Image (tube, rainbow, N blue to C red):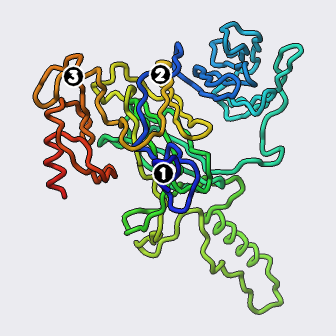
Amino acid sequence: VSPVDGFSNTPGVTTQRLFYHCLHSLKPPQSPIKELRSAVGSIYQSERAGLIALEQNKILVGTNRYIAWGYPDRSIRMGQIDSDKSSCIHEMCDADELTCVASGDDRTLFCGSSTGCVSVWTLCRKPVSLRRRKLLDGHSDAVTCLGDIATSCSTLLHLWSINGDLLAVVNTCDSNLILDPSQMILSLTFSTMNEWDSDNVVVCGTSDGVVKIYSCVIVENDGSVEMPHIEPQAKPGTLSSASVHARLDRVRRRLKVTGSQDTSEAHSPEPPTTPITTGTQVKDGDKTTCPRYVRVLMQRAALTVHTAFNRPDNTHPAPITCLTPSKDHKSFLVGDGVGRVWCWQAGEDGGRADHWVQDVSRQRCTQCQHKFSIADRKHHCRNCGQIFCAKCSRFESHITHMKISRPVRVCQNCFLRLRAQT
């Protein structure tokens, strides 16, 4: 099946071609499809209302209502999405501050507090009010969803199984620093169309305006990669090896004192021959066994147009605060810290690419410095992304590292470099 026909490039699979199947062919948007007055916090898609974007500390409830929190008086407010007026204000009597809110349906709210507790609230319609139901201490109903979990800490991205096992971890920082505060992860999302698809991605948005796309792959370990692990916390009631040996010594002394005087010999119980593990990994000497195959998070692409701070052609860069794929997974929605929503769409090979310099930022040819007039056409080098005139970009070449097998327009420097590589 040809990938240009809109289908997956996986052999034998005829499902539709999704955005993560052609990451290098995503078309950068020319203008935002929606703009808010503050940072984007959540993006929803509805068949009736279309695209709905809300600010931070707001979630959609039902089809046209929102719940807002994070006010100085620690209240929860409800209103219509097309109006700033609150229709209901619930004053929280608790001293705990709400840190996150999620909605299960149009009548149930889950609120997380700074103490780590999760409270469940019911939305009453007549009259409009909130009624606290209970505190969550475990699953109270059937589990309807299972899957991997992604968490972030500064610039570290962790991937976990549903059982809490650490599958892979990667440092998303591009600089030499181990943890760069200017590249902190602010948002995370998954691709959720086909759970069996090996090309599924984990996407994170950073504070420097870059959207980084990763895939979890299984590679053969050459000995340089260790299995990711964390130090488990000691559970209440769990005995350490020191306490076990101390208890055995007390038992031995008690048996010696209360032993039968009629017996000629008193035997105390021998210590257990099986090793007692305390959660730490058992090592044979100084050698540790590395697994043959390991999971790693491999970066597949990065989106930088309009938002990245490291691109001089971005006039208004901003951090990435919200990420979500479209319902059909043919496009990808990005919300930034100044309230703009960008839509990246999957297109055919040969369109605009992320590394292309924006047209409005260049008025002269990069090589000959020819000033472009209204009638002159600006040509992008498919390899470096710079803007050239028709004379300086008349060369054509294959680009192997970008998987472009047909001759495309490149500049003279890239033409010589690509020809030397082949």
Q: Please state which amino acid type lies under the numbered disc 1.
A: Ser
The local crowd at label 2, few if under 14, some if 14 to 19, many if 20 or more residues have their Cα within 10 Å, is some
**Residue that numbered label 2 is attached to:** 32
**Residue that numbered label 3 is attached to:** 376
Give the numbered dot on residue 246. Answer: none
Q: Earlier in the sequence, mark 3 or mark 1?
A: 1
Determine the residue positioned at 57% across, 25% down: 41
Residue extending furthest toward the right: 126
Q: Is residue 193 above or below residue 271?
A: above
Q: Nearer the viewer, mark 3 or mark 2?
A: 3
- Residue 100, given in percent of the width and then of the height, sits at 65, 29
Determine the residue positioned at 42% across, 35% down: 27
Q: Residue 74 appears in which quarter of the rendering?
A: top right
Q: Earlier in the sequence, mark 3 or mark 2?
A: 2
Q: Please state which amino acid type lies under the numbered disc 2.
A: Pro
**Residue that numbered label 1 is attached to:** 215
Q: Please state which amino acid type lies under the numbered disc 3.
A: Asp
> Could you give the CA–CA distance between mark 3 and mark 2, rounded to whole angstroms?
27 Å
**Element type at marker 3?**
loop
The local crowd at label 3, few if under 14, some if 14 to 19, many if 20 or more residues have their Cα within 10 Å, is few
- Residue 150, given in percent of the width and then of the height, sits at 56, 45
- Residue 339, given in percent of the width and then of the height, sits at 50, 19
